[in-house]
Image (spheres, rainbow, N blue to C red):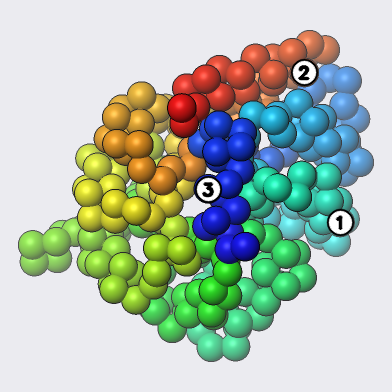
Amino acid sequence: MTSFEKLNKIQLKNNTRLCVGLDPQMEKLPKPIPKNIEGIFEFNKIIVELTSKFVSAYKLNFAFYEQFGSRGIEILEKTLEIIPESTITIADVKRADIGNTSKAYARAIYEHFKFDCATVNPFLGMDSLEPFFDYKNRLNFVLIVTSNAGSSDFQKLKIDKKYLYEIILDKLLSNFSVQNLGLVVGATSENEFQKVREIASENFILVPGIGAQGGNLQNILEKNRNQNLLVNVGRDIIFASQDENFQDKIFQRTSYYYEKLKIF
């Protein structure tokens, strides 16, 4: 089964487009959780136990694990082990490089860690992406328009009659299949989301920027027109509370987004 098919299957099974970002920050761990590396795993385990029936994917940003060196990678691997086999896992690495370097990155993500999907950066060009797309059964989410304030510095530059992100999108669509190519478009760029959705009508779009970053979920859903979509929510769920009642709050926020992101 390809990651594209697996994502469709779990979305229908759990009736949701929700993805939870497992991006723990030690200083934000709730009071009952020890603020150490073991506490991070304990926190992740609680989140997965509380949310797994209400999500279709988990996205793990490597930065929150790599900062602790080998122990952090250990926690990342242990977290992957507790995620249900039917649920999509996304390595949020934003990787790409030249030649054998990119091949090594892709091999690490898809062969060692065995993620279903990865986020990749198109800035170095098509040859930097190809090692990831050589894994035909995987789904790669390419950065198109990101959710941060600085996204307009380069992504929204106009070159002749097209914006840079549109040029990148055209190139990607002409080289990679729908099954292999996902797109990252931030909820904070609604107009750009609409344009991307019109051009790429069948591709999965991964949408960050909901919750803490202020993206409007309802507007994104309206512009999506019921096409393939995965909405990531991180801080607004996992850090819903730092008090003793944090599990109740996490469940409440997950339930809220689950209702918003039902497919049928």
Residue at position x 65%, y 14% in the image: 252
Q: Earlier in the sequence, mark 3 or mark 2?
A: 3
Contact (CB < 8 A) between labels 1 and 3? no
Kind of element beneath mark 2? helix
Q: Is residue 34 above or below residue 131?
A: above
Residue at position x 64%, y 29% in the image: 54
Number of marks present in the image shown: 3
Q: Earlier in the sequence, mark 1 or mark 3?
A: 3
Q: Nearer the viewer, mark 1 or mark 3?
A: 3
Q: Is residue 74 visible?
A: yes
Q: Position of residue 119 (x, y in %)?
A: 53, 59
Q: In the displayed image of the protein, which residue is found farthest to the left?
A: 161
Q: Position of residue 261 (x, y in %)?
A: 48, 28
Q: Residues within 10 Å of mark 3 (few under 14, many from 20)?
A: some
Residue at position x 76%, y 26% in the image: 50
The residue labelled by disc 1 is 74
236 on left or right of 174: right
The residue labelled by disc 2 is 247
Contact (CB < 8 A) between labels 3 and 2? no
* Near-viewer residue (227 or 257): 227
As drawn, the label of residue 8 is: 3
* Amino acid type at image mark 1: Glu
Q: Residues within 10 Å of mark 1 (few under 14, many from 20)?
A: some
Kind of element beneath mark 1? helix
Q: Earlier in the sequence, mark 1 or mark 2?
A: 1
Q: Disc 1 to disc 2, how far (Cα)?
A: 24 Å
Q: Position of residue 193 (x, y in %)?
A: 29, 44
219 on left or right of 162: right
The image quarter in which residue 19 lies: top right
Kind of element beneath mark 3? helix
Residue at position x 77%, y 18% in the image: 247
